[in-house]
Image (cartoon, helix red, strand yellow):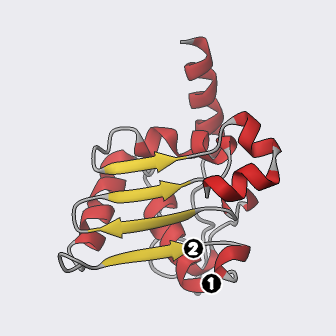
Amino acid sequence: DSEWQQKRLERQSFEMSAIQVPFGNTPHKAELPYDSLQFSNRLRALQSLIDDEDGLLFITGVDGNYNLGATIALNYLFFGSSGMQVWHARRDSSFDDCFFAIGKTRTYLYTGTVASFWKLYDLCAPIQQLEVVTLSAGEENDVDLAEERK
């Protein structure tokens, strides 16, 4: 229980909200915290774009050749960015090894590291149709095992 509370505090202090991008002299309104309900709504919106046998695959970091579309999708879905903020969101290198596949009824997320898993834990835990895969501590320290798991 203590470990869970510690991880939750780390997640809250991390707060990966997007950087505010000013347009003209008008300041942006304060954003509401991004939570699992908003995440679920955005996930369902993406799933509604998919045919029964199709899916969306987003690969971030070096494996995805630092694909801008995958980064935008990551910012939109997992960090609550929208509008122009998806282009200017803060990058977290712990998600460089992340990929996610969205299907009509099921979504798979590979977080790559235990640290990135805990950063998304509160957001993803309540979502039943989301399967999260991450490395164990032993796999994380062994590059060959990590690549095999991926």
Q: Which residue is mark 2?
A: 59
Q: Amino acid at mark 1?
A: Asn
Question: Which dot marks residue 67?
Answer: 1
Quarter of the image with the C terminus is: bottom right
Q: Are marks 1 and 2 in contact (CB under 8 Å)?
A: yes
x and y percent of residue 48 in the render?
20, 74
In screen coordinates, is 138 left or right of 98? right
x and y percent of residue 119 in the render?
59, 44
In screen coordinates, is 40 left or right of 117? left
Q: Is residue 71 visible?
A: yes
Q: Nearer the viewer, residue 26 or 72?
A: 72
* Residue shown at 50% from the left, 74% from the top: 58
Mark closer to the observer (1, 2):
2
Number of numbered discs overlaid on the protein picture = 2
Q: Amino acid at mark 2?
A: Ile
x and y percent of residue 110 in the render?
54, 55
Q: Looking at the picture, does residue 132 appear above or below residue 46? A: above
